[in-house]
Amino acid sequence: MTAPARKILDDLRRARALVIHPKDEEGAALLEQLGRLGCAVSLAWPPPAALPADIDTLFIQLDDAQVMHLLPSIEALEPAVIAIVAYESPTSLKAIADVNAHGVLNKPLHPRGVLTQFALARYRRGYEGRLTSKINRLEETMKGRRTVEKAVRLLVDLNRIDEDAAYKMLRDRATAARVPMASVAESVVSAHEAMSGLGLRIALAEKT
C-alpha cells in the first residue's frame, strides 16, 4: 500500500460518523461496512432533533425523510456530509444542496461505492476547511492593514508628522510591546474615537 493510500485509510479510521438511515438491511449493511474500516459509527432513526456534537462525518438519507430541521446543526458542526438518495428529482437535488453534501450515495446501496464517497467527502470537507481558514486569515490581514492605515492618517493629522514617521511610531510601539502593529493601531483608533466622543484630542508623542 502506498503512503498516500495509507494516509487516506488512516483518516477514515479516525472518523466519527453518524448514519441517519432507516433501521433496515441497507442501514445495517452500511453500518457494518463503516465499522469494518475501524471508524466510530452509530445509526440514528428517526432523525434526531440535533446532531451529536462529537461527529465529523454524516451519512444522511434525504428521500422522504424530515431532516431539514438538522440544517442548523450541520452548519454549526460542519461535518463531511454524504447524502443518500433513492432517485434524482428536483426535490432531492435541492436537498443535496441544502445539506451542502460533499458526496452522494445512490440507493440501492452498493458496498463498492461507499469507501470512495466516504474518502472523497472527507477530502472535500478538509479542503473546504483549509480554504476557509486561508480566506479568514486574508480577511484578518486586510482588516489589520486598513486599521494601520487609519491609525497612520490619525497620527499624521493629530501630530503633524509625515506618514513614514507615523508608521515608524506604530512599528516601534509594537516592537517594544511585542504585539502586532495592527493591535497598536487598533488601540490608537479606539482611543481616538473614544476621546473624540468626549470632545478631547489624542496625540502620541514620538519616543525619545
Image: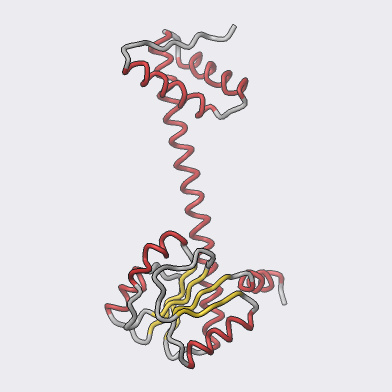
Q: Quadrant of residue 73?
A: bottom left
Q: Position of residue 109 (x, y in %)?
A: 47, 89
Front-most of 2 and 100?
Answer: 100
Residue at position x 47%, y 46% from top?
A: 136
Q: Write the residue at 32% across / 83% down.
A: 64
Is residue 142 rendered to the left or right of residue 115? left
In the image, taking residue 25 as reference, residue 207 lies left or right, namely: right
Q: How is the image coloured?
A: secondary structure
Question: Quick check: 30 left or right of 197?
Answer: right
Residue 116 in the image, given as x and y percentages of width and height: 54, 79
- Residue 203 % position (x, y): 44, 10
Observer-nearest of 143 and 51: 51
Q: Relative to 41, does residue 198 appear above or below in the rendering?
A: above
Q: Quadrant of residue 201?
A: top left
Badge count: 0
Tell me where residue 50 appears, x and y as whole percent: 41, 68
Quadrant showing the N terminus:
bottom right
Between residues 79 and 120, which one lies in front from this camera angle? 79
Dividing the image into 4 quarters, which one contains the C terminus?
A: top right
Picture residue at 43% right of the left edge, 28% below the top: 147
- Furthest residue toward bottom: 25
Residue at image location 43% in from the left, 15% down from the top: 155
